Amino acid sequence: MNIKKENIGDLHELITIEFTQEDYQPQVMKSLKNLKQKIELPGFRKKMIPIELINQKHGKTIRGEEISKLAEEKIYEYIRENELNLFFSPIYCRDKSIVDFNKDGNFSFSFELGIRPQITINYDELKDIVYYRILATDKEIDESIMSLCDRAGTFSSAETVGDKDFLLVTVSYINEEKTFISTLALNYLKKEALNQFIGKRVDDEMDIDTTKVFISEMERSTFLKMKVEELEMAPVHVHIKIDSIHHLIPSEINDHFFEQFFPDGSITTETELREYIGQQIARQNAPELDSLYRTDIMEKLMDNLFSTLVFPDAFIKKYFSTSAKENKTPEQVEEIYDEIKKELLHKLINEQIMKDLNIRVSYPEIAKCMENIVRQEYFGTTMPLDEAHEEQIQQYVIELMKEKNNVNNIVNNIIIQKSIQGLKNKLNPPIKELSSDEMVKEIKERYLPETTEMVEKPKPKAKPKAKPKAKAEPQTEIKDDPKVEAKAETNVETKAEVKDEPKVEAKNEVKAKAKVKAKAEAKAKVKAKAEVKDEPKVEAKSEVKVKAKAEPKVENKDEIKVETEAKPKTKAKPKAKKEKVEGENSAISKGENKETKQE
C-alpha cells in the first residue's frame, strides 16, 4: 500500500491511496471462505462448494466490499495519524481513482480534503467593547413597591370586578354534569384576558377558554383543581358563575410589611427597600445584557477575520455542489458562498473561544439546568415545592433527558453562559450604565436606524412532555462536518433566582431587532423576572434581550470538553467510520461523502 499527498490549493489536499493485490487479497479470501460456509448450490453438498466457483459467482461483490472498506479505513487512519482538522468529510474523486472490481489487480482511491484554518484571537483588541448595565428608574422602583404592597394587602367585598380582584366562582363543565367551587385571582390571568372579567358583577355568568386566559399551566391546574400532568384530559371551555368578589386593599409600608417580607431584619426602611429593588432589577437584566456583550464581541471578530483568514474555498464549493444532502448546483453555491463562509467562520471563532477558556460541561450541570426549566415552565417557579411536586419534576427531567435534542439545547445554553462569563473575566470590559429607556434608544440607534418596529414575543404553552423551551434561531445549515455542524442558536430564557428574597417581575417589554455584519440578529427586550416561593415580588420595568449566532451542541457525557460550536464532543481524534459497501454500488465507488466521526 502506498499513500500520496498533493497540495491542490489553499488548505486543499488530494490524497491517493494505492493498493496491490497483496494488500486486500487475504481479506477477500477470508470473506469468500466465510461465504462458502453459508451458501447452498444445487449439485454440491453444503460447505463443499469449490472456492473457485464461489469466486466466479460472488468474487466481484466481495472484492468491491473489502477493497472499498479498506480504502475507507485507510483514509480515516491517515486523517487521525496526521491530526487533520477538516471541513466536512473527504470527497471521493472518481475521475482520479483506478477502480475495476471485475478482476484482481492494483487499485487506487483519491480523496480531496479541506483543512480548517488556524485561528488566533487577539483578546486585547476586544477590551474596549462596552458592557452595558441597566439602572432602575424611580418609576420602576415605585411600581415594584406597589406590587409588594398588593401582595401584602387584604381583601374586602366589592360590587364589581376590578383588575386586581379575587373571585369565588362556581365552575361547570360544558355538556358534562360536573360542578365545583374554585377561586380566580385576576393577577394570574393574561393581560389580554382581563377585559372578559372587568366590570362583571356577583351572579354574572360566562364561558371561558381555560387554555387562553391563564398565565401558565400551573395557574390553570390550580383553577381546575387538577394536577399539571392531567391537564391534557381537562376541558378547554368551562362555564363560571361569580359567587363573590373580593377587592384588594394594598398594605402600608410599615413594620408589619417589613416583617412579612424580610423576617431576618435585613431591610427595615423604605430607603433600604428602594436600594434593594434597584439591585434586583439590575441583576435580572444581566443575562440579556450578557448576550448583547457577546454579540458585539462576535461581530468585531467576524469583521477582523472574514477578509483575511484563508479558507479552502475550492473544496467547500465542491462539497456543497456534489453532496447529495446539500443538493445545490455550482451556481447556487456561488451565490450563497459568502453566507456559508461566514457561518463556518462564526463556528471557528466560537470553537477557539471555548478552547481558550477551557469550557467544560458536566452531566450534573445539564440535569440541574433541565430541572430549573421544568420548574419554571411547568410550575411557574424555580424554588423548591412540596414532595409530590418535587417527584413530578424529577420524573419530567428523566423523560426530557432521554431526548438528545433536549440535552443538546441545554448544553448550548450552559456553554453560552460560561463563554460570556469567561470573556467578562478575561477582558474586564468598561461599564456603561443606562436607564431602560436609554438602553432601548441605544439599541435602536445601533441596530435599527431605519425602523422602529417592535416584535412581540409569543408565550408558548408548556405541556408535561414538551421539550424544554430553548428557542432556536435558524442559521445557514452546514452538514457532514467532522467537527462543525450548523446549529440553530438556542437561547433558554434565564430566570434569575432570588432565594428567601422578594420576587422581581417584569412589567413592560421593549424589543428591538438588529442585523449585524455577521448575520447575527440582535434583539432588544427589557424584562426581568425572579421567582421566590412565599416571598415578596418586586416588579421591574425593563429588560434587554439580545440573540447572537449559532451556538455549540454537546452530547450527553459525564463530562464534556467543548471543542466546537455546533456539536462539541469529547476531545479526540477523528475515528474511521466503517460501513458495509457492496461491489460497484459502494459508497466510495459512487462518490458519496462520509462523515468523519470523533471518538
Image (spheres, helix red, strand yellow):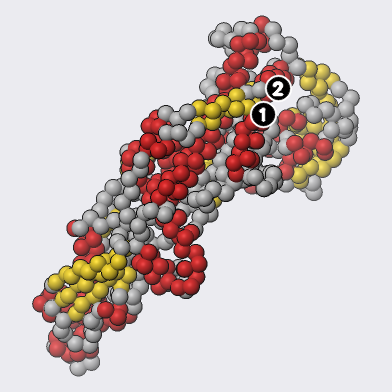
First along the sequence among labels 1 and 2: 2
Side of 216 relative to 131 (left or right) = right
Residue at 30%, 79% in the rendered image: 94
Side of 204 relative to 223 (left or right) = right
Side of 208 relative to 97 (left or right) = right
Q: Are marks 1 and 2 in contact (CB under 8 Å)?
A: yes
- Image position of 395 with respect to 390: above or below: below
Residue at 57%, 49% in the rendered image: 515
The residue wearing badge 1 is 541
Q: Is residue 369 in view from this perspective?
A: no
Residue at 30%, 61% in the rendered image: 11
Q: Position of residue 149 (x, y in %)?
A: 71, 17
Kindly give the residue lying farthest to the left in the view shown.
22
Kindly give the residue lying farthest to the bottom in the view shown.
43
Looking at the rendering, which quadrant does residue 19 occupy? Answer: bottom left
Q: Position of residue 492 (x, y in %)?
A: 52, 41
Helix, strand or loop at mark 2: helix
Crowd band around label 1 with a 10 angstrom C-alpha radius: few (<14), some (14–19), many (20+)? many
Q: Amino acid at mark 2?
A: Lys
Crowd band around label 2 with a 10 angstrom C-alpha radius: few (<14), some (14–19), many (20+)? few
Rounded to the nearest angstrom, the CA distance separating label 1 from label 2 is 8 Å
Q: Amino acid at mark 1?
A: Lys
The residue wearing badge 2 is 139
Residue at 27%, 69% in the rendered image: 8
The front one of 246 and 132 is 132
- Image position of 256 with respect to 18: above or below: above
How many circles with numbers are drawn on the protein?
2
Q: Is residue 189 in view from this perspective?
A: yes
Side of 140 relative to 246 (left or right) = left
- Image position of 74 with respect to 417: above or below: below
Q: Quadrant of the N terminus?
A: bottom left
The front one of 494 and 363 is 494
